[in-house]
Image (cartoon, grey):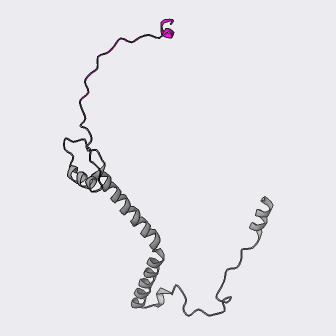
């Protein structure tokens, strides 16, 4: 592998395609020499170049997929927060909407139980295991 790599590096670089190798002649040289152009022609070429760059940079499939992902994420968060999220308030802000939606599907809406305050439990004497008594 190493000898092959060294041999390839020692070879001369492949010649690139030149204007002499192409069967048809180019109509214009690109990029043009801006020092020989008038300001109006320079502006026209700059606009054309910028337009070509914008056209090359457009990726309609990628843009469409990103938009769809954003819309799906926003929709999911809204539906989840309105229909399923537990707000832990005395009255949840979307109770009426939840009842209407679940009623439309023929299901009953049961709000989450209110969080109750925990009462301190009395400590019971712990029973010892045999293994603990022999220590």
Q: Residue at x 41, y 62 (%)?
A: 69
Is 107 colored magenta in this rendering? Answer: no
Residue 127 location, x and y as percent?
41, 11
Judge left or right: residue 132 versus residue 92: right
Which residue in the rendered view is the most extreme toward the top?
A: 134
Q: Which of 30 and 89 is in front in this view?
A: 89
- Looking at the rendered structure, the number of numbered marks drawn on it comes to 0
Q: Nearer the viewer, residue 78 or 41?
A: 78
Whether 127 is drawn above or below 34: the answer is above
Q: Which residue is drawn at 29% across and 20% down?
A: 121
Residue 130 location, x and y as percent?
49, 8
Q: Which residue is drawn at 46% across and 78% down?
A: 53
Residue 111 location, x and y as percent?
25, 43
Whether 52 is drawn above or below 92: the answer is below
Q: Which of 117 and 29 is in front in this view?
A: 117
Judge left or right: residue 99 versus residue 56: left
Q: Which of 97 and 26 is in front in this view?
A: 97
Over which residues does the magenta segment extend? 115-135
Which residue in the rendered view is the most extreme toward the right?
A: 3
Is 122 colored magenta in this rendering? Answer: yes
Judge left or right: residue 28 versus residue 23: left
Whether 71 is drawn above or below 55: the answer is above
Q: In which quarter of the image is residue 16?
A: bottom right
- Image quarter in which the N terminus is found: bottom right
């Amino acid at each position: 592998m190493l000898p092959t790599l060294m041999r390839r590096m020692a070879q001369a670089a492949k010649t690139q395609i030149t204007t002499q190798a192409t069967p048809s002649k180019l109509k214009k040289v690109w990029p043009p020499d801006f020092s020989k152009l008038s300001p109006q022609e320079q502006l026209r070429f700059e606009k054309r170049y910028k337009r070509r760059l914008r056209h090359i940079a457009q990726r309609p499939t990628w843009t469409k997929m990103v938009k769809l992902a954003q819309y799906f994420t926003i929709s999911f968060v809204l539906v989840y927060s309105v229909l399923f999220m537990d707000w832990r308030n005395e009255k949840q802000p979307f109770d009426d909407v939840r009842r209407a939606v679940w009623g439309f599907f023929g299901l009953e809406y049961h709000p989450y139980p209110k969080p109750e305050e925990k009462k301190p439990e009395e400590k019971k004497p712990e029973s010892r295991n045999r293994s603990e008594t022999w220590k």
